[in-house]
Every structure is written in structure tokens, then in C-alpha cells.
Image: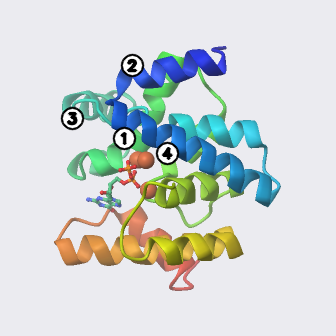
Amino acid sequence: PYSHEALMAKVAAQLTDSRYQHCLRVEQTARKLAAANGVDVELAGIAGLLHDYAKQRDDATFIELIKSRGMAPDLVAYGNGVWHGYVGAELIKDELHIYNEAILNAVRLHTVGAPYMTKLDQIIFMADFIEPARDFPGVDEARKATAESLAAGVRFQIQHTLAYLIQKGAPVYPQTLATYNAWVGGVA
Ligand code: DGI
Ligand code: FE
Ligand code: FE
Ligand code: FE
């Protein structure tokens, strides 16, 4: 297995400096949320560091993986925003030799969430949204909700994201909607 330093170098090599710095901030934020919520701090840190590992790969790379790994064909229509987590986890396995499903699932779900999320999943989902450089209307409210409980943070984020996608006229991935229905709409 790669050391933490080696993983940092692997991530840095795949990303622009600003995106890499975001990954480091998500790592630190995830470590804090893990400590506050009784989750393994090292595991959360690694998942945070790796969450956007595949963000800057070509569309063609993702489309090829969706096909060759037999992933849901409807993924092809949704673009990098949805692919880099779901499909990016395959590149983390292939290139970093990380097979820990807790880490991989947290990466897979970090953008669209899921009706059921482990605490680690919730931590990476929230750390990405509230890391210190995030600056959007509502981010302070998101930080406050997350400090009260991970679940309150998840509810806040998925409501915000769905509203954002709809006001942009962007396609909503069905799992994004399922996450909203489960966490906000009360539909399990
Ligand atoms: O990778 P980051 O920029 O740090 O953040 P992210 O992974 O949370 O989000 C990446 C993008 O994905 C963001 O602009 C919102 C978008 N997104 C989230 N859910 C959906 C989505 N895009 C589409 N088209 N459909 C979704 O359901
Ligand atoms: Fe991301
Ligand atoms: Fe996010
Ligand atoms: Fe991110």
C-alpha cells in the first residue's frame, strides 16, 4: 500500500494545484468531522484526500469505464459531475490499489449521495461541501447544520443541490433525486 505521502503525490499529479489544495482541505475537514462523530480519522482523511482523484480525466475515459465495467448505462448521459465519483472509484482501485469499500463508497457517493449513507459517506459528502474555502450563499448555514448533526448537514446539502440543478436546468441524476426523497422528502 502507498504511504500517505505517496498518495498525496499521486493525487497532486492528477490535478491542478487549486483542485489539489481543495482535496487537502477536504481531508482536513473530514478528519475533524470524523473525530466529532466517532469515525476512524485516518480512514476519513484518506477518503477526503482521494474524493476528487478522477475529477480531471477526459470524458472518453469515463465513458469507456462505464461500458467496460458494466456500470449503469444511464450514467453516460450525466457528465463529469456525476462520473468523477462513481466511475472515479474504479481508477482509484486500478491506479492506487485501494480496495477498501468504505473508502471507495464514500468517493462514489460524494456528489450525489444515496438514500442510505454510512457516517463515513456522510462525512465526505459534507466535507466537500463545507471545506474552509467554499464560499456560496448558505455555506455558513450548511456548516452550522453539519456541526449539529451529519444528517442535518446532508439534508441541507441535498436540498440546496437539487434546487441549484433545477434552477440551472441541469439534468438530475435519478440517484440525486432518490437522495433528496429519502433525506428531505421522507420517502425511504
Ligand atoms: O467535485 P467538486 O466540485 O468538489 O464537487 P461535487 O463533486 O460535489 O460536485 C460536482 C458537480 O456535480 C457540481 O457542480 C454539482 C454537480 N451535480 C451534483 N448532482 C448532480 C450534478 N450534476 C448533474 N448534472 N446531475 C446531478 O444529479
Ligand atoms: Fe467532487
Ligand atoms: Fe459535493
Ligand atoms: Fe470535491
Read off the residue under disc 4: 108
Which three-letter amino acid code belongs to the residue tagged 1?
Answer: His
Sequence-earlier tag: 1 or 3: 3
The residue located at (43%, 32%) in the rendering is: 53
Sequence-earlier tag: 4 or 2: 2
Read off the residue under disc 3: 59
Sequence-earlier tag: 1 or 2: 2
Labels 4, 2: front one: 2
Label 1 and label 3: CA atoms lie apart by 10 Å
Q: Would you say 33 lies left or right of 182 here?
A: right
Read off the residue under disc 2: 13
Q: Mark 4 and 3 residues: CB-CB less than 8 Å, in contact?
A: no
Residue 93 against residue 123 in the figure, above or below: above
Label 3 and label 2: CA atoms lie apart by 18 Å
The residue located at (49%, 52%) in the rendering is: 110
Ligand 2 within 8 Å of the CB at mark 1: yes
